[in-house]
Amino acid sequence: MPSLEPIPNRNPNLPDGGSDDEADPELVELLRQHLGMGGKQQNNLPPETRVLEGAQYVFDNAIDVALSPAQTKEAAETIWRLMQKKAYSTKTWSEHELHPKTKDENTVDFIFTMDLLNFSFWSDEKDESKRFCIEYRGKKWTGYWSLVAALQRALEEGIPITTPEFWIDEEHCTEEVLRHVFRSATDEEIPLFKKRMQCLREAGEVLCNEFEGSFVTCVEDANLSAAGLVNLLTENFACFRDETKLNGKRVRLYKRAQILVADLWACFDGEDYGEFNDIDKITMFADYRIPQMLHQLGCLRLSPSLESHIRDLKPIPSGSTWEIELRGTSIWCVELIKREIEKRHPEVKDAGRKGVTSSEENTPQDSEVENEDAEEKTKAEKPAKTYGINAILIDFFLYDTMKNLEQEHNESIPHHRTRSIWY
């Protein structure tokens, strides 16, 4: 890893974004529209999550987290080549043994449940053998996979853990039953158990009262818009409303809301319940793994005080400036990586929403194969595939790579420690 250059101070010419006492400009604009006080109506414009806008603001105003432009460009090419080599696409999602293989309404509700509870699996236990894990199918699963394994195990045991009506039935869906669902193979229980139970109860009430008891209704109400579905989630479900403020400015991060949409898109391969006409509006999912991987690649630069804090495994409070800078700058970094890949390899823009297309520029000419036998000629004339790139696939790839490095104990830095329901 190259030596780190000094991190520049905040640009004094950048706006502070207002104080906490100032009126929220978005609320002011909504009030103006409601009262008919000038300005064009925005109702007919396509939905926007405004996550990327907030991420850029965080990057522009960050003090303790910065990016290396050179390393970001180099990482973009490395990521591109590895993703092409591994044929990384939406199909990669379904290849894991724990992810659902069926593609129906029950799968939609499984994915909703999975991402409703997809947060905070890291452990303070130094002995790995004592950390929380789920035993299922003869294996022990940790992290995110422990959640997926727990849900699959519960369904096999006849517990309707993905059914919203069950979540709000406190006579049958008791704390004891839920503790059984998430029972660990060790003495350490799943982190934030009470919060997970609360998320189930609250989301169940919303789904049953507003969306006919199924997340399928939400997907249909979004009208093929990924951004629209994210907004529907964050407006109706408090536990998906992953927002904060930096210098008084509202910053949307929406990690779990966005990954829920991304998981639907990947599981259904961009079709049926996974069809979205604006999937590229989804950004990277700001958690603690991707900043760690971006640091590994030399893209993310940390101030000495923040870096030593992370290396000492000291907690960083949710909503603190350090945490916002880590998450927001990581979103912006992946966006820059995506743009660099598109700049160097414009064919990815034509790769389609499913992530795969045949690149005609790689088609060999007749003269190149005229002396080959028929079998080799057929093989050679088949165009090489170009696998599309977006922030979702880059995130999935970086996450999987970081988990592999962790298993090999090859991380350049630990992940930051923030205990929250947001990631």
Image (spheres, rainbow, N blue to C red):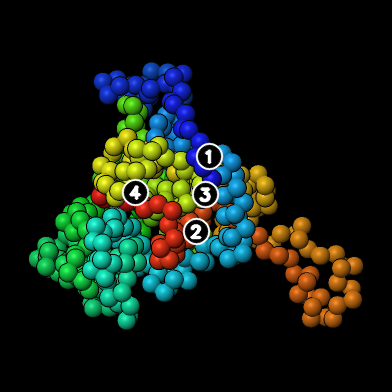
Q: Is residue 267 at least partly visible in the picture? A: no
Choose the circle earlier in sequence order: 2 or 3: 3
Q: Pick out the residue farthest to the front.
A: 3
Give the spatial CA distance, label 2 vs label 4: 24 Å
Give the spatial CA distance, label 3 vs label 1: 12 Å
- In the drawing, does residue 1 fall left or right of residue 159? right
Amino acid tagged 1: Ser
- Nearest the viewer among 172 and 346 is 346
Q: Residue at x 67, y 63 (%)?
A: 385
Q: Quadrant of residue 48?
A: top left
Choose the circle earlier in sequence order: 2 or 1: 1
Amino acid tagged 2: Phe
Choose the circle earlier in sequence order: 3 or 4: 3
Choose the circle earlier in sequence order: 1 or 4: 1
Under tag 3, what secondary structure? Answer: loop
Q: Is residue 144 above or below residue 241?
A: below
Choose the circle earlier in sequence order: 2 or 4: 4
**Residue tagged by mark 2?**
397
- In the drawing, does residue 290 fall left or right of residue 73? left
**Residue tagged by mark 3?**
1
Give the spatial CA distance, label 3 vs label 4: 16 Å
Give the spatial CA distance, label 2 vs label 1: 21 Å
Under tag 1, what secondary structure? Answer: loop
